[in-house]
Image (cartoon, helix red, strand yellow):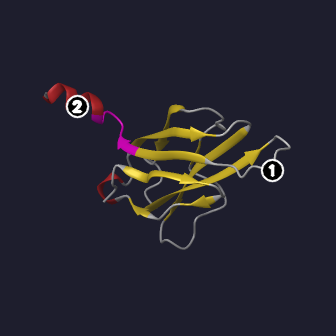
Amino acid sequence: MLPDFLLPECVVQTDGQGLAIDLGPKRGKLLVLTLGVITVLEQEGLEVSVWGSPDGENWGSKALATYAPKSYCGVYSILLNLVSRLDIQLVRVHWKMKRWSKREVTPMFGFYVYAEESGARGCAAAVA
């Protein structure tokens, strides 16, 4: 089952990828993906994408969803439409970092990626 966090809050200094997360009952749904950037050093860029797989081995050649590059702290949301992608069983987050200054400082970002079914906030508010 899809937990709320595709990638829990973390601080990274190298490119990488998160764990494979089973979509469970969220398979084939419209999801809202929220990227929260909480730490960033000056003159750095973060590229975050979400990849999908039917079996945990084949992750394809193109991300399912990609955020525009980020250089500032903030909260950013995009949609991931899996309605026509019923073959996708697993998802995982990939990230790449860039530095454009000449300083010899290791890049560093603190961020998380959260996923929820589209309309979940509105339904929760209506029940309350």
Image quarter where the N terminus lies is bottom left
Q: Secondary structure at mark 1?
A: loop
Task: Report the label total.
Answer: 2
Residue 45, disc: none
Residue 29 to residue 42: above or below: below
Counting from the top left corner in percent of width and height, residue 77 is at 49, 34
Q: Secondary structure at mark 2?
A: helix
Given this view, does label 2 or label 1 mark the residue nearer the observer?
A: 1
Residue 123, disc: 2
Is 18 positioned to the left or the right of 47 in the image?
left
Image quarter where the C terminus lies is top left
The magenta-colored residue range is 115-120
Amino acid tagged 2: Cys
**Residue located farthest toward the front when viewing the structure as drawn:** 104
Q: Nearer the viewer, residue 17 or 110?
A: 110
Going 29% across and 32% down the picture, which residue do you hit? 121
Is 16 positioned to the left or the right of 106 in the image?
left
- Label 2: how many residues lie within 10 Å, few (<14), some (14-19) or many (20+)? few
Examine the image and state in which quarter residue 101 appears. Answer: top right
Amino acid tagged 1: Glu
Counting from the top left corner in percent of width and height, residue 48 is at 60, 47
Is 107 positioned to the left or the right of 111 in the image?
right
Q: Nearer the viewer, residue 27 or 7?
A: 7
**Residue 88 appears in the rendering:** no
> Disc 1 marks which residue?
104
113 inside magenta stretch: no
Is 70 positioned to the left or the right of 125 in the image?
right
Residue 90 to residue 55: above or below: above
Going 57% across and 70% down the picture, which residue do you hit? 58
**Residue 64 appears in the rendering:** yes
Distance from disc 2 to disc 1, alpha carbons, whole Å, reads: 49 Å
